[in-house]
Image (tube, grey):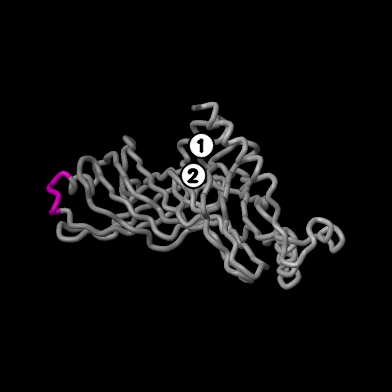
Amino acid sequence: MADERDREVAELEENVREVTINDRGSRGEENEDKEGGGGVKGFFKGVAEAVGGIFSWGAPDADITGFTLPVINTKRAEVIIDVLITNPNPIPIPLVDMIYEISSDDRKLCSGTIPDAGTIRAHGSETIKIPLVLIYRDIVDTFDDIEPGQVIPYLAKVTLLVDVPVIGRITIPLEKRGEIPIPHKPDVDLDSIDWDHLSLESTSATLHLSLKNMNKFDIGIKSFEYDLQLGDVSIGNASLGEAVSVKGEDVGSLEVPITFRPKDFGGALWDIIRGRGTGYTMVGAVEVDTPFGPMHLPFSKTSETTLKGKADDE
């Protein structure tokens, strides 16, 4: 039975190979050769030539127009890469894949692929955004020569895979170079306190602080907030009186006003204010402007150094 079925299949395949398709009124293969091709093949060839004559097909144009850092702090940087794509064709074209990679001096920092990235409208332009995150701990742990506070070069590569009618699938490579920071938290010291007004009901003072910028880039301090603890007593929080600029790896001086009620904290704090020195603890954060955008930089400081007011040293 199997041999007979195989013989029937072989005969059917032979018959199919002998079948030919001719246009009505044609004279077979001889007519096709003389007139440049006819039949079904000639028909579709003619349609393709006619469509090609009506429409102009071309490869899309693309460029990386932006590399922004909407969020950046000591832990991570959120990056958005803007890719502008222009479609010169009369129909929309699909983006098959977008492949991206960010490296620094041939060290890969991150990479990935965005499948089915969208469609570019006919005779139009679209900006495609590629969001990604750089985790600084991973970078510093992986590469020994990268440390917090540095500014490192980056190379952003984006490869577009696009399907264009008539032309087919094409690859568009893009590149953009620049610099990106690895932020470091500042080092803050409380140098002294000026007691402007002393009473159990209300005490006002001016805190004299030094802030060392641990980064290689300049910072402009917009706000400075922290909680101050003298000895074992937390006296609340304070905020910066005016903005201060500090150059890279330099030290700036800050004056921060503070007001509190000593009677709310018992006699221990009043003894400190009246002349007894004490250590201190500060925990807080600074909001800064940088060449790379705004940053949130936290800090903490504990000092066992005896702290006295300026009036006590006179």
The 10 Å Cα crowd at callout 2, few under 14, some 14 to 19, many 20 or more, is some
219 and 261: which one is in front?
A: 219
Q: Is residue 233 left or right of residue 195?
A: left
Q: Three-letter amino acid code at disc 2?
A: Leu
Reply yes or no: does residue 266 show up in magenta. Answer: yes
Residue 58: x and y in percent read: 71, 63
Which residue is label 2 attached to? 134
Q: Is residue 24 above or below residue 154?
A: below
Residue bounds of the magenta highlight: 263-268
Q: Position of residue 12 (x, y in %)?
A: 60, 41
What residue occupies the far right of the structure in this picture?
A: 34
- The reply to whether the C-beta atoms of the residues labelled 1 and 2 are less than 8 Å apart is yes
Residue 57 in sight in this render: no
Number of numbered callouts drawn: 2
Kindly report the distance in space between the C-alpha atoms of the residues bearing marks 1 and 2.
Answer: 8 Å
- Decide which of 263, 271 is in the foreground and name it: 263
